[in-house]
Amino acid sequence: ATDATSAAGVATANTSPGTADGARGLVEHWIAGSPTPGSSTRRGPVWNPATGERQAEVVLGSRADVDLAVQTAAKAFESWREVSVTRRAKILFAFRELVDRHVDDLARIVTAEHGKVLSDARGEVLRGLEVVEFACGIPQLLKGEFSDQVSTGVDAYSFRQPLGVVAGITPFNFPVMVPMWMHPIAIACGNAFVLKPSERDPSASRLVAELWQQAGLPDGVFNVVNGDKEAVDGLLEHPDVAAVSFVGSTPIAKYVHETATRTGKRVQALGGAKNHAVVLPDADLDFAADHITAAGYGSAGQRCMAISAVVTVGSAGDTLVEKLRQRAIDVRVGVGTDDSAEMGPVVTDQARERIVAAIQNGQSEGAALVVDGRGLRVEGHESGFFVGPSLLDKVTPAMRVYQDEIFGPVLVVLRADTLAEAIEIVNANPFGNGTAIFTGSGEAARTFQRKVTVGMIGINVPIPVPMAFYSFGGWKDSLFGDRHVHGPEGVGFYTRAKAVTSRWPHVEGLSDAAFHFPSSG
Ligand code: NAD
């Protein structure tokens, strides 16, 4: 392992993210502690969304590449599982220090390939770091239970053990944070990890792999296989993968859940979202408009917890829409490295076209297009994948622009007469990731939090992403499987329990073996 500065240097030299001359690099796998192109000859483009240039290529792994990574991880697991929990925690602490030192390096790579503004990319790395910090407490988190004298001379206790090789398959929109929801906890629990990051922004995972190595993690415990469906299918069907954590769109989450559970794996598959902000007339409407604007257009709307639908209640409607309109046109759109920009481009030209078509559809369906971001051009970056903030009013649940996850800077507004009606709208939506209520009434907020069929709820908080020591996950079509990620449920997901009933025969007063089912006493 080299020093911390050279790790960033290696990652940038090999992958050229964001280089001014657009020189192309090749983003390789990371297996057994070294980069490797693997056996596949397939390659995918890595775009610079701010310029529209193809800035690098990523190796699209084959099943043989996946098999090599899994076999490597399986071998590493045999010794990693024997490493004491305190030693594992020390490596986690070292990793924590290294990630902390490299926040800006990681953020720059994210901005170069994803497009989000640097301050937002830093925020994502810091939220990932919080999960690493949570995982540093693994000795405490893995403490089992013990019951003395459950029968005469008999004790009962439980403890948790790692699963083996576990896989993480992650989306483009948080290339550092979402994998960090998974690998720090999985590794701290004693598992070996194979990450299949998004092929659209794969380079950050390379630097993360180098930081693990510098932290003292034995080679083979953390591996990265780049690729697309072929690599994913290789992981889902591999007999030596014990569990799969997936985050991405709903159709793929469903597919991952069905495929991997069929081969007996433990699966948590987080899907897409349509997150509603319900605004009551008693809310501070300026506060609500400020926060909904930031939550709707931040990261160009490409967050699974972005607010994408606003439900106004009663008299809040017209006033709020006017405030949202003013704020939407004031959002500063620019390249991610421009310090004054609040919102960057979307990830690919294909995404841009899909978003533009969704706005057009909404208008054709009868929605009122209050702010149209389709024509936006950023000076000097005319080929970048930009769409400006857009606002559609008078949207109904029957419209496609409401039903589909647009995953772009588009806010749709629906009108309800009462809180009960607003809750019905939220609950009728098949997604159930996050939702927020803006109100001055504790009673209304309490009713809302109890009645909505959504996993994460904000009260005057637009993006209620749980802290690392809680668990993150939605309901309904936003999560397939029964365990949320990180926090206590993350530890539960990456371990399985043993319960031991123990007696030592030399203890006096033991009764003889009996044929009836043993009971206490
Ligand atoms: P995606 O579903 O296209 O891709 C996610 C992962 O699945 C990637 O690694 C990709 O390579 C792989 N994949 C894509 N198509 C596949 C196929 N046909 N078969 C097998 N694997 C395939 O998602 P994305 O566009 O990268 O990310 C955006 C989506 O992720 C949005 O829907 C967003 O809501 C969702 N998301 C959800 C959460 C959450 O916590 N619920 C968090 C972040 C993102």
Image: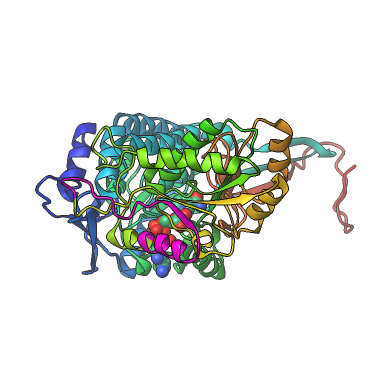
Query: For the point 56% across and 70% down, which residue is it?
Result: 262
Colour convention of the picture: rainbow
* Quadrant where the image shows the C terminus: top right
Number of labels in the image equals: 0
Compare residues 245 and 394 and report the one nearer the observer: 394
Horizontal and vertical percent for residue 421? 70, 51
Left or right: residue 89 compared with residue 97: right
Decide if residue 247 is in sight here: no
Q: Position of residue 460 (x, y in %)?
A: 58, 34
Q: Position of residue 119 (x, y in %)?
A: 33, 34
Horizontally, residue 192 falls left or right of residue 378, namely right
Q: Is residue 419 left or right of residue 166?
A: right
User: Which of the 4 image quadrants contains residue 224?
Assistant: bottom left
The answer to which of 210 and 247 lies nearer the viewer is 247
Q: In this rendering, is residue 453 above or below 109?
A: below
Left or right of 306? Residue 447 is right
The quarter of the displayed image where residue 18 is located: top left
Q: Residue 373 location in percent, x, y? A: 35, 51
Check the image and name the residue furthest to the left: 21
Question: Where the N terminus falls, by quadrant?
Answer: top left
- The reply to whether residue 516 is in sight is yes
Determine whether 87 is above or below 309 in the image. above
In the image, which residues are magenta? 355-381
| Quarter of the rendered image showing ligand 1 | bottom left
In the rendered view, tell whether residue 488 sits above or below residue 484. above
Does residue 56 show up magenta in the picture?
Answer: no
Of 246 and 408, nearer the camera is 408
Q: Indicate yes or no whether the magenta region holds residue 379.
A: yes
